[in-house]
Amino acid sequence: MHALGILLFDRGILRAIFEHARNVAISSVITAAGLQVVRQGSETFFAPSTFAGYGVVGIGLTLLALNFLDGLWRLARFRSHLVWQATLVLAYLVVSWRVAQLVLLFKTGGGGMPF
């Protein structure tokens, strides 16, 4: 139990987990905001609404991808058994994907991804 506490608190693992969850939520909200602009077709000052909306969606998806890559990079640095690393990577991808889906679902009012 003491080793788990050292791993989570002293090595900053718990902080990294919350940072990644926050980053996924923020980039998902950015993506959902772009999708909302595309759906509503609201006017913007500098570009057509669909162009601006898809631009914001692209930025949000890029941030999501960069966050996934950062998480995978950090998981790959663990010095542990290959099966354990593969399990952690799979769990990270599944949880991150679900968090992004839930944020998009709530932000867009039920029009999130179907799976």
Image (tube, grey):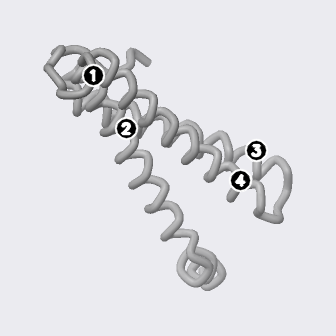
Query: Whole-Å distance between the Cαs marked 4 and 2?
Result: 21 Å
Three-letter code, disc 1: Ala
**Which quadrant does the C terminus fall into?**
top left
Location of residue 32 (image quadrant):
top left
| Residue carrying label 2 | 28
**In the image, residue 80 above or below residue 113:** below
**In the image, residue 15 above or below residue 89:** below
Q: Nearer the viewer, residue 30 or 112?
A: 30
The numbered dot on residue 73 is 4
Whichever of labels 4 and 1 marks the residue nearer the N terminus, that label is 1
Residue pictured at 39% horizontal, 15% vertical: 114
Residue pictured at 29% horizontal, 22% vertical: 35
The numbered dot on residue 113 is none
Whichever of labels 4 and 2 marks the residue nearer the N terminus, that label is 2
Whichever of labels 3 and 4 marks the residue nearer the N terminus, that label is 4
Q: Nearer the viewer, mark 3 or mark 4?
A: 4
**In the image, residue 86 above or below residue 8:** above
Whichever of labels 1 and 3 marks the residue nearer the N terminus, that label is 1
**Which quadrant does the N terminus fall into?**
bottom right
| Label 3 secondary element | helix
Label 4–label 2 contact, CB within 8 A: no
